[in-house]
Amino acid sequence: MKSETALVLFAHGARDVRWAQPLERLRAAIGRSRPQCRIAIAFLELQEPGLPETLAALAAAGITEVDVAPIFWSKGGHIARDLPELIEAFRARNPQVGVRVLPVLAELAGMDDFVARAILQHVDAPASPPGPA
């Protein structure tokens, strides 16, 4: 029997709901490359759904393998401390579901060069004329 899989884009969250718009664009971009992949978004705090609720919903839907992609630049306290606690609590209640945490953004292969090129494109672009004062 083939296992059912999902990808969770896990981000901090913010009070302004517009903060999640880039995550929606990222989910759409991944979906275009992997249309068969179930992709969810979950937040640590300030926005819903939280990671525990998202993982529980995936388990209830029959998902047996989950990759969690932390949409954090580096491994700070949330990734080093909070995320493992959330994952372990879920595993204790759902041992039938395998959960793998992917690297943070700065640890993804080629990310430093990609970001450097993107920044330099803006540095090298002609300056916009100043607007009215």
Image: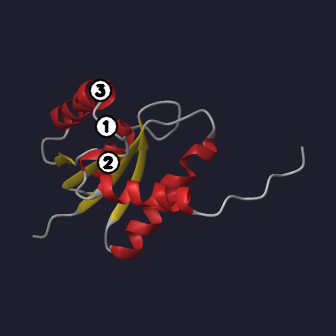
Q: Position of residue 70 (x, y in %)?
A: 32, 44
Q: Position of residue 114 (x, y in %)?
A: 36, 59
- Marks 1/3: CA–CA distance: 14 Å
Q: Earlier in the sequence, mark 2 or mark 1?
A: 1
In the current view of this chain or complex, which residue is farthest to the right?
A: 132
Type of amino acid at the residue the image marks with label 3: Asp
- Marks 3/2: CA–CA distance: 17 Å
Marker disc for residue 130: none
Identify which residue, 22 or 131, lies in the foreground: 131
Q: Position of residue 39 (x, y in %)?
A: 37, 60
Which class describes the residues within 10 Å of circle 3: few (<14), some (14-19), or many (20+)?
Answer: few
Residue at position x 33%, y 28% in the image: 78
Marker disc for residue 74: 1
Q: Quadrant of residue 36?
A: bottom left
Q: Quadrant of residue 30?
A: bottom left
* Whether residue 35 is visible: no
Identify which residue, 126 or 51, lies in the foreground: 126
Q: Which residue is mark 2?
A: 105
Label 3 close to label 2 by CB (< 8 Å): no
Type of amino acid at the residue the image marks with label 2: Leu
Which class describes the residues within 10 Å of circle 2: few (<14), some (14-19), or many (20+)?
Answer: some
Marker disc for residue 82: 3
Does 114 sit left or right of 108 as displayed?
A: right
Does 29 sit left or right of 22 as displayed?
A: left
Identify which residue, 13 or 53, lies in the foreground: 13
Q: Earlier in the sequence, mark 3 or mark 2?
A: 3
Which class describes the residues within 10 Å of circle 1: few (<14), some (14-19), or many (20+)?
Answer: some
Residue at position x 31%, y 68% in the image: 37
Q: Secondary structure at mark 3?
A: helix
Q: Secondary structure at mark 1?
A: loop
Label 2 close to label 1 by CB (< 8 Å): yes
